[in-house]
Image (tube, rainbow, N blue to C red):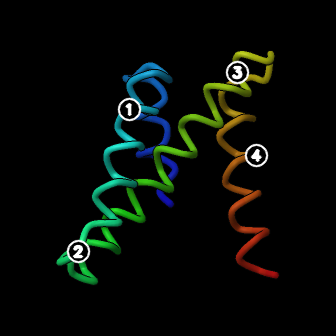
């Protein structure tokens, strides 16, 4: 997870575009012959896109962008600590 990338995805892409991209990446990750390195990169992209989608939703619900970004980061870091 990289917060600057999540911010850029949020600021430059619509939620609809991010959802379509997420669908393609998830399909790619399930294909035979995908290497471990490709899966790692794909997983990182999926995490960043999911973060941007969550930020879109939170901002739509009235949360300021900065708080939405930090909230997602804390959520991810909190789940890692468990």
| N-terminal label among 3 and 4 | 3
Q: Which mark is residue 32?
A: 2
Residue behind mark 4: 71
- Circles 1 and 3, Cβ within 8 Å, touching? The answer is no
| N-terminal label among 1 and 3 | 1
Residue behind mark 1: 20
* Helix, strand or loop under label 2: loop
* Helix, strand or loop under label 1: helix
| N-terminal label among 4 and 2 | 2
Q: Rounded to the nearest whole Å, what is the CA distance between mark 3 and mark 2?
A: 37 Å
| N-terminal label among 2 and 1 | 1
Q: Rounded to the nearest whole Å, what is the CA distance between mark 1 and mark 3?
A: 20 Å
- Circles 3 and 4, Cβ within 8 Å, touching? The answer is no
Q: Rounded to the nearest whole Å, what is the CA distance between mark 2 and mark 1?
A: 21 Å
Q: In this view, does 28 lie to the left or right of 49?
A: left
Percent x, y for residue 66? 67, 32
Residue behind mark 3: 59
| N-terminal label among 3 and 2 | 2
Q: In which quarter of the image is residue 68?
A: top right
């Amino acid at each position: 997870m990289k917060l600057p990338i999540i911010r850029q995805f949020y600021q430059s892409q619509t939620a609809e575009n991010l959802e379509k991209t997420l669908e393609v990446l998830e399909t790619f990750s399930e294909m035979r012959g995908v290497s471990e390195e490709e899966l790692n990169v794909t997983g990182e992209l999926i995490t960043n896109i999911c973060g941007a989608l969550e930020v879109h939703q939170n901002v739509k619900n009235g949360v300021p962008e900065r708080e939405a970004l930090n909230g997602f980061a804390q959520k991810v870091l909190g789940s890692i600590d468990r």
